Image (tube, rainbow, N blue to C red):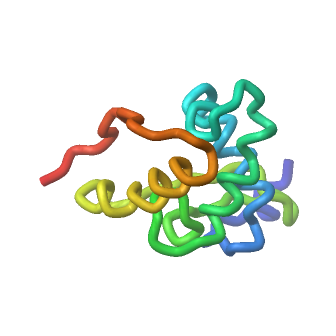
Amino acid sequence: MNYSDTNIRPAYPNDCKQVAQLIVQAMEDLACTFANTNDPKKTLPLFEHFFKEPANQYSFENTLVYEIEGEIAGSITVYDGSLLPKDRKPLLEYIALNYNVSDLVIEIETLIG
């Protein structure tokens, strides 16, 4: 592999299809819980949607992608943990309305403070 052909860059909304697959792969069962399905492939539209939107936990705004020869090979999503309740709210409202998932208790994955 020629590492001169690699690049880390901010994500763009049109990276949604590639990055949604990586998010679902990393989240495993939790992604399925959010989409009320046992099929990880059925979760992709949910994460593509939120990746393209600003101001949420899974937004392109919070993501860097790693490219090799122009192809996305990895991604990392990072955000201010103190904003997690606000940034998670759009997802929780959306899945309640569109996937009939409510009263979901999700572990806080960051330290707030």
Residue at image position (41%, 35%) is 104
**The image quarter in which residue 22 lies:** top right
Q: Nearer the viewer, residue 1 or 85?
A: 85
The x, y position of residue 67, in whole percent, is 76, 60
At horizontal 57% and vertical 42% (from top left) the residue drawn is: 100
Whether residue 21 is situated above or below residue 52 in the rendered picture: above
Q: Nearer the viewer, residue 109 or 11?
A: 109
What's the residue at 62%, 44% (across, down)?
A: 99
Q: What is the residue that sits farthest to the left in this orientation?
A: 113
- Residue 37 place in picture, x, y as percent: 69, 30
| 9 displayed left or right of 18 | left
Q: Left or right: where does residue 85 sit relative to residue 64? A: left
User: Would you identify the image quadrant in which residue 108 lies?
Assistant: top left
Displayed quadrant of residue 13: bottom right
The picture places residue 60, in percent across and down from the top left corner, at: 59, 68
| Residue sitting nearer the eye, 61 or 40 | 40
